[in-house]
Image (cartoon, grey):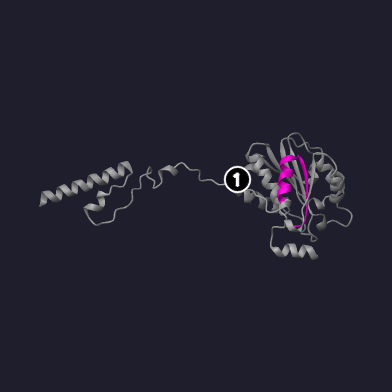
Amino acid sequence: MEASMTKRAAIKRQTRETSRDHGVLDSRQFMEDSKVRRLPTHAGWSPYPSNDDRDQAYLKTLKPKSEGQAELMTAIDNHNLVLALGPAGTGKTYLAVAKAVEALEAGKIGRIVLSRPAVEAGESIGFLPGDMEDKLAPYLRPLYDALSDRLSMKRVKALMAEGLIEIAPIGYMRGRTLNNAFIVVDEAQNCTYVQLKMLLTRLGWHSTMVVTGDPQQSDLLPGISGLTDVAERLAPVPDIAVVRLAEQDIVRHPLVASMIGVL
């Protein structure tokens, strides 16, 4: 009787060692007694060995949600200068930034340049502390939101530290030539005609510029915004795309489209 128990213990010990060494589950463990065995925790074991090398990363697929958005995405792919005009909520800024990230990740351009006029929406908040980026941060929040939706904030900060994502105030753009870059000029309805002319002529070789804005929501005094005039003048120019989005392209809450129609 004692010899039989010793033999059985030896078999169980050998079975445990084999399972631990080879990372396999031996059914004999369950035939020896009724105790439940822990699954092997060996690094090489997997219930689906064919999936061990699968890529754990993912990237959100950029798909248009309306005909206007599809037109804008096609225009960005096929033109170096695109003006996207339309009401709030049509995805102008998001699509422009998403396309910029897509181009950077694919190695088509060397950097992303983001620019936006520092104009308050009818309410002055006074002087802001910090350096240039700190002062511009509240105005560039929509661009950061779009960036963080396509990239993690940790990666955004790393790219900014490397100079691959640049914050460029409109006031400091004079005299620059932006080569091998994807430039996004947001809230262009708050730029004057002179400012827009200066910004548009910064376009360099192997670069794409997308200018977004809503001519109906300018925070400047009436008649000062130059976006509408610039868009009308550039519309007939070959190789420049002027995409006009409408209420049916709004992808925010349905009430936004209803309000835009009556306000």
Report if residue 135 is visible in the image: no
Report if residue 165 is visible in the image: yes
Residues packed near mark 1 inside 10 Å, few (<14), some (14 to 19) or many (20 plus): few
- Residue 80 among magenta residues: yes
- Using the rendered view, name the quadrant where residue 86 is placed: bottom right
Q: Amino acid at mark 1?
A: Arg
List the single residue furthest toward the front. 67
Looking at the image, residue 221 sits to the left or right of residue 170; the answer is: right
- Residue 23 among magenta residues: no
Position in image of residue 74 (x %, y %): 72, 44
- Residue nearest the observer in this picture, 71 or 230: 71
Looking at the image, residue 171 sits to the left or right of residue 146; the answer is: right
- Residue nearest the observer in this picture, 117 or 43: 43
The region drawn magenta spans: 69-88
The total number of labels drawn is 1
List the single residue furthest toward the left. 1
Residue at figure coordinates x 63%, y 40% from the top left: 105
Residue at figure coordinates x 46%, y 41% from the top left: 53
Give the position of the C terminus as an image quadrant. bottom right
- Secondary-structure class at tag 1: helix
Indicate whether 57 appears above or below 221. above
Position in image of residue 242 (x %, y %): 80, 46
Position in image of residue 48 (x %, y %): 41, 46
Position in image of residue 184 (x %, y %): 74, 45
Q: Which residue is mark 1?
A: 155
List the single residue furthest toward the top. 205
